[in-house]
Amino acid sequence: MSTALPADQVAPRATPELSDRALVRRLWAYMRPSGWDYSVAIGATLGNSVIWIVRPWLLHLIIDDVFGQGNRDLLVPVLIAIGAVGIVTAIDATVGHWFHERAAQGAMLRLRSDVLRHAQRMPLSEVRARRTGDIAAHLSSDATVIAGVFLDFVSLVFAQAFRLPAYLAILFAIDWRLGVIALSSLPLHALMATKLRGTTRAASGRVQDAVGRLSAVLTDMAGGVRDIKAANRQTWAGERVGTEADGLWRAQVHLSLFNSLRWAPNVLYWLIYIAIWAVLAGAVVDGAVQLGMLVAAGQYMLQLGAPVGNAVSDYSRMQVAAGAARRVFAFLDSGPGPAPPATTTQPVGERGEIRFDSVSFAYPDSDAVLRDVSFRANPGETVAVVGPSGAGKTTLTSLVLRFYEPTSGRIRIDGTDIAGVDASVVRERLGVVFQDPVLFDGSIEQNIRLGRDDFGSDRMVEAATIANAHDFISDTEDGYDTHIGERGLRLSGGQIQRVAIARAILGDPRILILDEATSSLDAESERLVQEALARAAAGRTTLVIAHRLATVRRADSIVVLDEGRVLDTGRHDELYERCDLYRRLCDLQFLQPDAAQE
């Protein structure tokens, strides 16, 4: 049997590791839209480089010309120049940092948006196969590390590239021996950077993996606080978090060891500085070289060490960021490719007819869940699907929503095979209420709308009224603006379900899918939700996935599933009389045929 592919995707793509050149191209694509900001930042960086070149020369002038030769006329201009350099440095640093930040954060916003969009487009099976913490890490820690490279990119490429040859040229101009000494130190720095490259990249990859694991565990533990406390397993939870936190600590310490090696060139700088004095000190004593020139040469040599040392340091940090970038791009390149170009975006579902024609389905690497399933829901009808646990009921919902494609057979809406329709177009015509709906941190209105601001307030209130939610919303202090907390913790189970029903019918869908919305409610909440569901279903084609049979006894048609096959189809009384499985399920729930007449 063939493996089922997710609905809005095709065959998976390979994700080989990006080369350094390809990685730079990918990163540059995110920086390019911030070109103006980067241009200003580059200008500020180059201006700062010029200032650093001028400073030692001003020191030479004040020592040799003002003090050494007693040139009083030069004192005021040199002091003014020194003051101007200080003011320009402050302004330049402020402007440069501001535009660096704008450019880097703009690039990060685009990268985070792509990660989030990709996560939303990924097949449901692919998302569930990943740790939630890994995706969160791509959006937070990975992106933050990469942002550091965006911030340093300008200084690394432009400032160091400009200052290094300038310092070498000046040292050669002062004394060719100084230039040779400075130039001879560069291969050693390059060798150190090369040695650090592989070890730092591997260590940074382990750190980011550890961050993802810890984030996943923290997410699990935070979401399961109630169950952990109820089972009195706080110690176990603490040990799990502690284990991952210890793993992250070890990985970070290992990475810090390699990062610390970037300070090793400091020894070399001072050895070179001593070499300068050894070369020029005698010339100063003999009067061949002025003292100020010696001081300036020493400053230039130390400043030469700064760009080289920064290059080694930045190179180490770039390897850390490169590891994070490769993780993010591997995620963006993961999963199946784009949908086939033949997919149509023409609307479906105006009448609301649903047909399953010989539909079979199997999850990847598993046995068939559905086998040759056929049934029909006419416009305006309510069709319920019942059966024991594992019969494949909820899988039907996933297929209609195009989370997955059937292995064989077709699902038609108003006669159109939805396999050829863009998944977003199909979902736009459906209203869905899941067994455990998710509410988000925000207001009640935000949770009903979910960003659909094209509907007016009257339509939202109408949807809430149909869902039996308007009264309890009005009784809250802030009404529709009431903040409900993460996952709707400030609402009861029945209130959450009614908000979810209002959300489902806000767009007036012609087809309503209910995945047993009352299975975990108390009697009063169930009554209110059942009333809401009955009103919501009026005039709509409704597909009910039923675990509690009392919710479907008035359905126009009931489909009995067993081991993925349609065992029987009919109304409640008919099925109770002729279908042994349905009768057994009814008896287990104390539901008799005459209950349909209540």
Image (cartoon, rainbow, N blue to C red):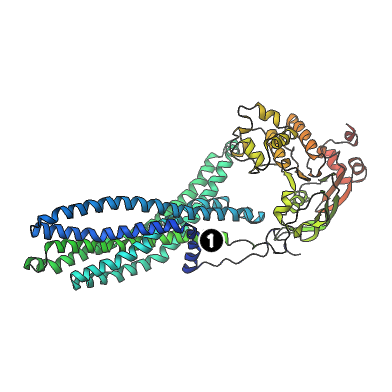
Residue at (84, 44) in percent of width and height: 380
Report whether residue 311 is seen: yes
- Residue 425: x and y in percent read 72, 53
**Depth check, front residue: 462 or 372:** 462
Residue at (66, 26) in percent of width and height: 475
Q: Is residue 45 above or below residue 282?
A: above
Q: Residues within 10 Å of mark 1 (few under 14, many from 20)?
A: many
In screen coordinates, is 234 left or right of 374?
Answer: left
Q: Is residue 354 above or below residue 57?
A: above
- Residue 194: x and y in percent read 37, 68
**Depth check, front residue: 114 or 229:** 114
Q: Is residue 501 above or below residue 340?
A: above
The mark total stands at 1
Question: Which quadrant holds residue 435?
Answer: top right
**Depth check, front residue: 595 or 535:** 535
**Residue tagged by mark 1?**
329
In screen coordinates, is 200 left or right of 468?
Answer: left
Quarter of the picture holding the C terminus: top right
Question: Which quadrant holds residue 176?
Answer: bottom left
Q: Amino acid at mark 1?
A: Phe
- Residue 129: x and y in percent read 62, 55
Q: Secondary structure at mark 1?
A: helix
Question: Which quadrant holds residue 372?
Answer: bottom right
Q: Is residue 181 above or below residue 105?
A: below
**Depth check, front residue: 482 or 267:** 482
- Residue 174: x and y in percent read 18, 69
Report whether residue 401 is seen: no
Residue at (64, 39) in percent of width and height: 447
Quarter of the picture holding the N terminus: bottom right
In screen coordinates, is 455 left or right of 309?
Answer: right
